[in-house]
Image (spheres, grey):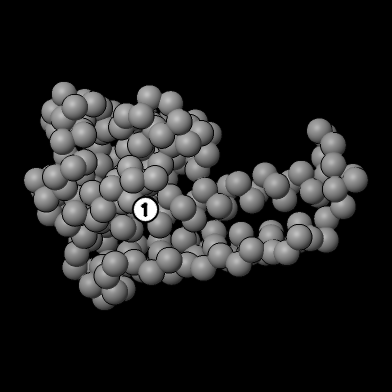
């Protein structure tokens, strides 16, 4: 075995552009440290764990405690945190108009009844996550073959096997408290209104074709 090297995915806008494009969702300071410190931290720790696993003794693995087991658990945490933040930043920077996402807009209408019904369900899903969690729109590839809104606590509790995250709303308190304080509902509304449905549609088509 050899360690996989993970890299911090570039956002579809510069750090300076983010301060303006995302200003209705999060403040300028948060656009910086949430990406360059927090998101990057998951990537850095993931790489540390990859290397540490090469040194950990699998023969000592057990259900109570082992270095191998704890590294595996934290690998899942940091990997999921990396992926969901990748999607989060890709989602943002638009005007919230779903009309430019033709294919996924049509799929939302089929699976949820209308965009408005999807929005109501997505907001409620995001509100219901724990104080550290996510609201996700996923493409349920291995199950229903439909779009589903999924609640995930932390980065991985409640995740669905084979479900591709298309929209990821970070509802950890660090994501919005600096601007909105405890007003999670307002943050979610602003998040939805800032979605870039063109990029979301591209992601949907990428995985629909597989």
- Res. 193 visible in picture: no
> At 56% from the left edge and 65% from the top edge, which residue is drawn?
6
- Res. 30 visible in picture: yes
Q: Position of residue 104 (x, y in %)?
A: 21, 41
Q: Is residue 178 above or below residue 116?
A: below
Q: Position of residue 143 (x, y in %)?
A: 43, 26
The C terminus - image quarter: top left
> At 19% from the left edge and 68% from the top edge, which residue is drawn?
20
Pointer 1 local density, CA inside 10 Å: few below 14, some 14–19, many at least 20: many
Q: Position of residue 198 (x, y in %)?
A: 19, 54
Q: In the rendered image, which quarter is residue 168 located in?
A: top left
Q: Which residue is mark 1?
A: 87
Q: Residue furthest front?
A: 209
Q: Is residue 202 above or below residue 188?
A: below
The N terminus - image quarter: bottom right
Q: How many marks?
A: 1
> Does dot 1 land on a helix, a strand or a loop?
helix
Residue 94 is left or right of residue 48, and the answer is: left
Q: In the rendered image, which quarter is residue 112 located in?
A: top left
Q: Nearer the viewer, residue 2 or 205?
A: 205
Residue 173 is left or right of residue 146, and the answer is: right
> At 90% from the left edge and 44% from the top edge, which residue is drawn?
60
Q: Residue furthest right?
A: 59
> At 34% from the left edge and 62% from the top edge, which residue is drawn?
30
Q: In the rendered image, which quarter is residue 29 located in?
A: bottom left
Residue 114 is left or right of residue 205, and the answer is: left
Q: Nearer the viewer, residue 183 or 114?
A: 114
């Amino acid at each position: 075995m050899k360690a996989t090297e993970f890299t911090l995915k570039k956002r579809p806008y510069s750090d300076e552009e983010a301060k303006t494009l995302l200003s209705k969702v999060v403040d300028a300071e948060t656009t910086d440290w949430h990406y360059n410190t927090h998101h990057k931290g998951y990537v850095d720790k993931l790489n540390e764990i990859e290397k540490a696993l090469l040194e950990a003794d699998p023969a000592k693995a057990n259900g109570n405690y082992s270095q191998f087991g704890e590294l595996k658990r934290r690998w899942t945490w940091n990997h999921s945190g990396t992926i969901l933040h990748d999607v989060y930043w890709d989602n943002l920077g638009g005007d919230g108009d779903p009309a430019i996402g033709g294919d996924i807009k049509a799929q939302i209408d089929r699976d949820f009844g209308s965009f408005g019904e999807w929005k109501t369900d997505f907001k409620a899903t995001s509100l219901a996550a724990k104080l550290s969690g996510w609201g996700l729109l996923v493409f349920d590839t291995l199950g229903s073959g439909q779009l589903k809104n999924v609640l995930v606590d932390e980065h991985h509790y409640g995740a669905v096997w084979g479900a591709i995250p298309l929209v990821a709303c970070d509802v950890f308190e660090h994501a919005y408290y600096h601007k909105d304080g405890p007003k999670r509902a307002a943050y979610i509304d602003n998040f939805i209104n800032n979605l870039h449905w063109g990029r979301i549609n591209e992601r949907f088509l990428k995985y629909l074709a597989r």
